[in-house]
Amino acid sequence: MSALTFDATGAAREAVESQVPQLAADNVASRIFAKDHTLWGKDAEEESAKRLGWIEAASVSQPLVADIVALREEFRAEGVDRIVLCGMGGSSLAPEVITATAGVPLVVLDSTDPEQVSAALSERIEATAIVVSSKSGSTVETDSQRRAFEAAFTAAGIDAKRRIVVVTDPGSPLETASREAGYRAVFNADPNVGGRYSALTAFGLVPSGLAGVDIQALLDEAEEAAELLREDSEDNIGLQLGAALGGTSPLRDKIVIVEDGSGINGFADWAEQLIAESTGKIGRGLLPVVASVTSPEVTEDIDDVLVVRLVSAEGEPVLGPNEAAVGGSLATQMLVWEFATAVAGRLLGINPFDQPDVEAAKVAARGLLDARPEATPANFTEGAIEVRGGEWLGGASSVEEAVKALLAQLGPTGYLSVQAYLDRLAYPQLEGVRDLFAKATGRPTTFGWGPRFLHSTGQYHKGGPAVGVFLQVSAAASKDVEIPGRPFTFAQLIEAQAAGDAQVLAEHGRPVLRLHLTDRDAGVQQLTDLVSALAR
């Protein structure tokens, strides 16, 4: 049996002691495993009835293993050993964690930044196959990436059909088009599983298995974990974590997730999407914050923050006040957090399976692509940064003054969201501004790479508590990439996505400051230097 541990202090311990006895008495655990769609209230029943397949994903996915392994061996026999995943949100985050933890290479292309796309297209195309993952089959980013790779394969004299693998829901437009096109393989995922709960379905398994992960072992671990979670017991760690997440009183709604010796690479990024998209709606929810053990949100006991440490199941974690710790293997942790998020949704009184506000930014972006309006003039330019903001900017005439004006909008229960629309592989140092901003403001700060966060935390930004302030960082590209069959390029697409999201946030009354880097290297350095000075 896979080891699984949980510990808690302060408010988290009090939540467990006050909430878990009732959760156990109400048979919440066994009812989740029985797919009882009434657990989240009348308004959630229709969606919940078709979104509980994740609870049995470990067993339902077993028949996929042999086909995935066979295809992997076929590719390797043909000299194809570079797998590129074209996917967004739930389609990309789980495979990224699975392969990184296993130490297996996988190129995750979850961006429309033309420089990141160009880099993915230019490396070892002769040894490359792509996995195109989309539940609906209509995801614009994924469709655009597929088109670009298909053209690149053809230009290199490669039969593109033999290098394209598709993962999608049965009956989706992508499935129909892919089978008609004769692509190498089409894997159907369980349509009764939402994207953020799909780690142990075809969406997580196909790219991970093709890249070389032992996916059979992953499923075996998850099946063992399911046996622990289905019990209506006060010792059920899934119920305990769910109570800690959603049952503190007063609610500590900023959930700071910290890697602290678990050995799982990137798990907090995956959990961030799961929690934010599941709980951020109807003006309430939990804001996940990905941080480190030295981050200000961890070292300071902030009233509305709950720290959750990801630890080794064999160790004995040292907890500060108002903290929880969860230990277990990767597949075990994935199932536990999915289960706990569903439990937290019940305690919060929300439907953890819908995402009513995700579509708004997509609609705005499509509208901007169709209309092609002139770019909004910058309020001013300083160095390599153009500044755009609302009336709250006042008389700001420098980047420093603009950033300070934005932070002045931050209330005592608020948070700052930093959103970077540029190549995350080329500029990983930009994530360092997160800790600096948290230190400068004394408030929880999130960092997301655009446009991938639009498929995850973007739901919380619009549907959760209206206390966020938003800093967008976009950038000019030194090169652009055409999208075959589309009247727009990747540079135009990512510009529309950033502008569309800013538009929707502004319509929701959220302050948005946009810093556009006219030179990437110089702009990243200028911004980093500025935030470093603010944090002193």
Image (cartoon, rainbow, N blue to C red):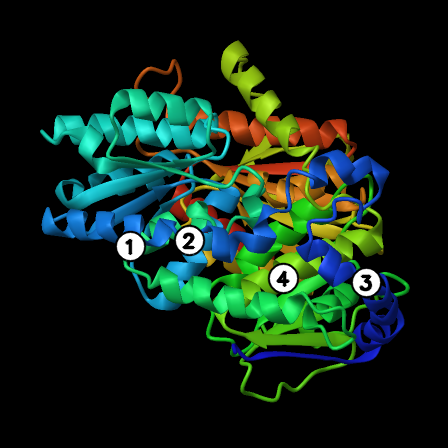
Name the residue that disc number 3 marks: 252
Q: CA distance from mark 2 to mark 1?
A: 10 Å
Disc 2 is placed on an element classified as: helix
Residue tagged by mark 4?
337
Q: Residues within 10 Å of mark 2 (few under 14, many from 20)?
A: many
Asked if residue 443 can be seen in this view, the reply is no
**Disc 1 from disc 3: Cα separation:** 39 Å
Going by the numbered disc 2, the residue's amino acid type is: Pro
- Give the CA distance from mark 1 to mark 4: 25 Å
Q: Which residue is mark 1?
A: 211
What's the residue type where badge 1 is placed? Ala
Q: CA distance from mark 2 to mark 4?
A: 16 Å
Q: Name the amino acid type tagged 3.
A: Arg
Which of the two residues, 327 or 454, is positioned nearer the viewer here? 327
> Residue at position x 59%, y 65% from top?
226
The image quarter in which residue 209 lies: bottom left
Upstream in the sequence, badge 4 or badge 3?
3
Q: Are marks 2 and 1 in contact (CB under 8 Å)?
A: yes
The residue labelled by disc 2 is: 95
Q: Residue at x 73, y 62 (%)?
A: 29
Q: Which element is circle 3 on? A: loop
The amino acid marked with disc number 4 is: Trp
Which one is earlier in the sequence, the residue at label 1 or at label 4?
Answer: 1
In three-dimensional space, the C-alpha distance between marks 2 and 3, rounded to whole angstroms, equals: 30 Å
In the rendered structure, are the residues bearing label 2 and label 4 in contact, judged by CB atoms less than 8 Å apart? Answer: no
For mark 3, does the 10 Å Cα neighbourhood hold few (<14), some (14 to 19), or many (20 or more) residues?
many
Say which of marks 2 and 3 sits in front: 2
Q: Viewed as shown, does residue 16 lie left or right of 197?
A: right
- For mark 4, give the secondary structure: helix
Nearer the camera: disc 1 or disc 3: 1
Question: Answer yes or no: do the residues labelled 2 and 3 have beta carbons within 8 Å?
Answer: no
Residue 332's x, y, as percent? 54, 68
